[in-house]
Amino acid sequence: MDLGWLVLVSILKIAFVIGVLLLLFAPVLVLAERRQSAFFQDRLGPYMGGFPMPRALLDAIPYLVLGAYVVAALCGVMFAISLAMVATGNGQDVLFTEPVFGIEHTWGGLMLVFFPLAVIHLVAAKILPFLFFDGRLTIFGGLHALFDAIKAFTKEDIVPPRGDKFLHSIAPIIAMVPAFATAAVIPFGPTIYVDYLLEQLPADGAIGGTAIDIQVANLNIGILYIFAIAGTGIIGAAIAGYASDNKYALLGGLRAASQMVSYEVTLGLSLVPMFMLYDSLMLPDMIRWQGEHVWGVLVNPLAFVLFFTASIAEYKRVPFDAPEGESEIVAGYFLEYSSGKWLMYMMGEFIEVAVSSAIIAVVFLGGWEVPFLTRAGWEAFGYRFDLTGTGFDVVSNVANSHLFIIIVQVVAFLAKVMVLALISIQVRWTLPRFRYDQIMSLCWKLILPLSLVNILVTGIFVLLFQQMGW
Amino acid sequence: MAYAIKKPGRTVADQSYVVEAVKGLGVTFKRFFQNTIGPAENRKTATIRYPEETREYPERFRGVHRLTHRVDGSPRCVACLCCSTACPAQCIYIEPAEYEADDPRHGYERYPRVFVIDELRCIFCGFCVEACPCDAIRMDTGTHVPASWKREHFIFDKETLMSIPGKDGTYVTANPRHEPGDPTHPGLDRDKAH
Ligand code: SF4
Ligand code: SF4
């Protein structure tokens, strides 16, 4: 692998990670934050933002829907025909005798093409009318987040006249950068063996050729890097409080700093049992262990609860949001921020939600692993999903191919992260805030001792199992 | 007699917080799914998409004024100035005029050459409607004065007021009128009392 190739791949990976964070998680979470809360409070939430659409397009929507239904029906019919052809066994050479695009048994291939086409058109026909509202393209209110951001960004940027201008400007950057930097070690998917994309991989053994991890950097200190970088976020909050020339902001900054320092400790300690279990600090290794055995949350649920709590507290989210308690210290350490800088704090917060959910998904929920899906394909209790020789073999060829498995696993990982993030946003809207002394005593008097006990007990069991040769 | 209120005891589950937190999440999630993907009749959503969707105002809501029509499309108003006299905000301005000499109503009643309501000064008390002896001014439009960015847009003249239909979409009121010349007309006018 020469240097240019390496640089290109790295840039692509960074672009992928930042793209996922900024284009997928940030808007979805901003929207979830605002509409999820609205929905269970019996409100509709913000939905207005949208682009005006030309009259002609709006008038054409019923016809487009009709067209989509027609296409879906045609694809369904074609799917049924090809299914019948394959099932009756004479699918080989009724119409096509030659393989097309390297896929033999052309009817089987057609089957695989027409099924998704039919589904896509059906879904499109169902959701198309709801993408528009009152002559605007709103995407179920999804564009509102974009307009919120534009509005916030174009507002006046105020620096307190007696505040420290330099520190005031640099604090949001210090607070936001760690959120992105921690994403660097998160594995979004398994290793890609570029040379074997369309083939089925062997179940075990080394695989040659070019291999790319879907991870910006696979550091051998792995998760310690996350703790280290996340710890620097404290500085952003503390500096913001200091530079704002505002007592409330200063109090907020102090609270943020002491809370984050405290939970930093528990955050690390609550994960130590998992390191002992997985025998590694590298995130992909943890995921592989869980793929071979069971998900971490089943092995050590206590660690899951402790880490989940500690990570919410570490990222200052409700119910641990004393640093920005509106009732006491207004908006806390970012009280004096407006416009783009304020947006940076918000953005950083949402990225942190995504990143901490990703860490939980990796350590406790098996990361990209999907049950019964191995590197070599779908497999349950020793039975492989394999239809060779039945006429449907092209189905199992595609389902077991390396590329398809990668796509399934990346999507599964993103789905796990999204579900966790939505749950933590729901936590935000459900639980009332703790008092500040409760936050601290929860940390030092409960979570810390419990995680120490957890380390001890897990250590005993790990040693026991090693002695027994498991 | 003072009596002690028994405090509810706390179980271990309450005290550990985790169980109760999960229960609370269950409540909010249930409500969330009920209001989003649940069947429409179970949804409890209380808000609407306001400017695009509107709620029906109550039956007796006093909305923007309208001037009712006669069957021939002319205003029912006889320019008696009762409404502008009654108006506490003094926002009605009427210039009465005589019908043309060949009109059967000439010498019998007048009509408003100018009829203006300043909807920004109006307090929507409805006194004008109460005062009108002819059922010529009504506030049964079921809608409010539309928002605008110019003060002039709120000065509603006769044509504007006559162009607003009632809630039921009609311009002529159900109260019958007895025009001069109709058999039902009592035959009185300003010159001769029978
Ligand atoms: S509603 Fe009241 S204030 Fe408005 S025009 Fe009629 S009498 Fe005047
Ligand atoms: S609207 Fe009614 S009260 Fe007002 S001037 Fe006309 S007839 Fe008289």
Image (cartoon, rainbow, N blue to C red):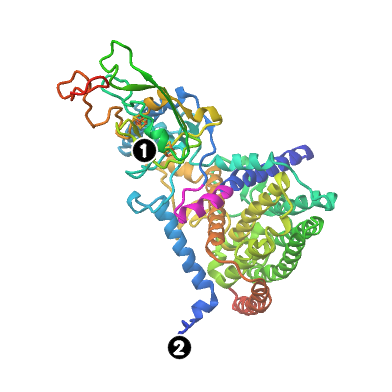
Q: Chain of mark 2?
A: B
Position of residue A150 in the picture relative to residue A116 (left or right): right
Looking at the magenta stretch, what is its main secondary structure?
A: helix
Q: Quadrant of residue A459?
A: bottom right
Query: Whole-percent x and y of residue A306?
Result: 61, 70
The front one of A15 and B80 is B80
Q: What residue do we see at 22% from left, 22% from top? A: B179
Work out whether B8 lies above or below A130.
Answer: below
Assign the C terminus of chain A to one quadrant of the image: bottom right
Q: Which residue is mark 1?
A: B142
Q: Which span is picked out in magenta?
A: A29-45
The front one of A339 and A468 is A339
Position of residue B59 in the picture relative to residue A231 (left or right): left
Label 1 is placed on what type of residue? Gly
The answer to if B42 sits in the magenta stretch is no
Determine crowd level at label 2: few under 14, some 14-19, many 20+ residues with C-alpha closer than 10 A: few
Mark 1 lies on a secondary structure that is loop
Query: Whole-percent x and y of residue A263?
Result: 69, 68
Question: Mark on residue B2?
Answer: 2
The front one of B27 and A100 is B27
Q: Chain of mark 1?
A: B
Label 2 is placed on what type of residue? Ala
